[in-house]
Amino acid sequence: MQNLVRTSGKGILVPPGIRLRPTIVAAIPTPLGGLGPEDDEGLARANFRLEYSEAKGRYEIAAFGIDRRSTPIEITGAFWRTVRVHSIVRPAIELALPSWTWPISALRTPRVSDEPIGAPRFEAQPEDGLLLAATAYRIAEISNENPALAVAETLGLKQRTATNWVQRARAAGYMTASAHESAARRIAAEIERTNPITLPSEEELARRIVWSAEQLEFERTAVFYGDD
């Protein structure tokens, strides 16, 4: 898996304490069902380079291509209009982030055999909950996702409650200071103790791309309702 996603460049520390490499180069196995016509005859491969923009606070797509490999599809203009580029690069960003963040990302990513696992409760230590919210928010921003939705899914909250947690996390300084890496690592370690994770197989990674495409479609069309 390390050969599929590689990072390079001088490290950058971003709030609340996530260390990034400015360049990601990846070659990701991609299901054709997530790219174009409904055809399940194997996996194509997406080859791309992402570059971190400090001005935008997220990775930008600098180069992107598709190798059909043994699949029967032809790379045409019509095919390119069906390619969900962001759905493909999203899991690569997740893998390129520091490995301690993976248990947090896994809270909202379905595994092969189950649904999103949901975060443990943090009522006893509200600061931990706010820092987890800030970390989930920032991971989503870095990946060019909907950060408020990411917080809601990570913490198992309704959208209005998640927005309130984000506001509280911002007021506490977790969104602007980069000095919280140790505490965020501790929270992630607590999550992993109850929900161990492993590096995904190529089939699991392909599944995540399909899930990512479904999530993006949901984010475009969802209407959120507040707590009753």
Image (cartoon, rainbow, N blue to C red):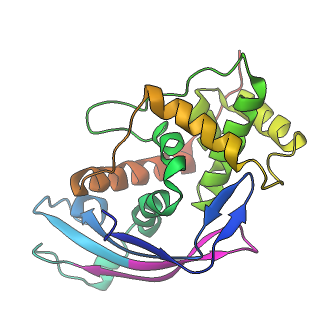
Task: Answer whether residue 2 is magenta in the image.
Answer: no
Residue 80 picture location, percent across and down: 34, 78
Seen in the image, is 171 located left or right of residue 80? Answer: right
Residue at the (33%, 52%) spot, across then down: 210
Residue at the (47%, 60%) spot, across then down: 90
Q: Quadrant of the N terminus?
A: bottom left
Instruction: Write down the region rendered in magenta.
Output: 48-67
Residue 109 picture location, percent across and down: 43, 41
Q: Main secondary structure of the magenta part?
A: strand
Residue 32 picture location, percent across and down: 22, 64
Residue at the (41%, 79%) spot, across then down: 48
Up the image or down, 181 lies above or below 19; here it is: above
Up the image or down, 165 lies above or below 210; here it is: above
How many numbered marks appear?
Answer: 0
Residue 26 picture location, percent across and down: 38, 74
Quadrant hosting residue 10: bottom right
Q: In the depicted view, which residue is nearer to us: 180 or 44?
A: 180
Residue at the (19%, 59%) spot, across then down: 38
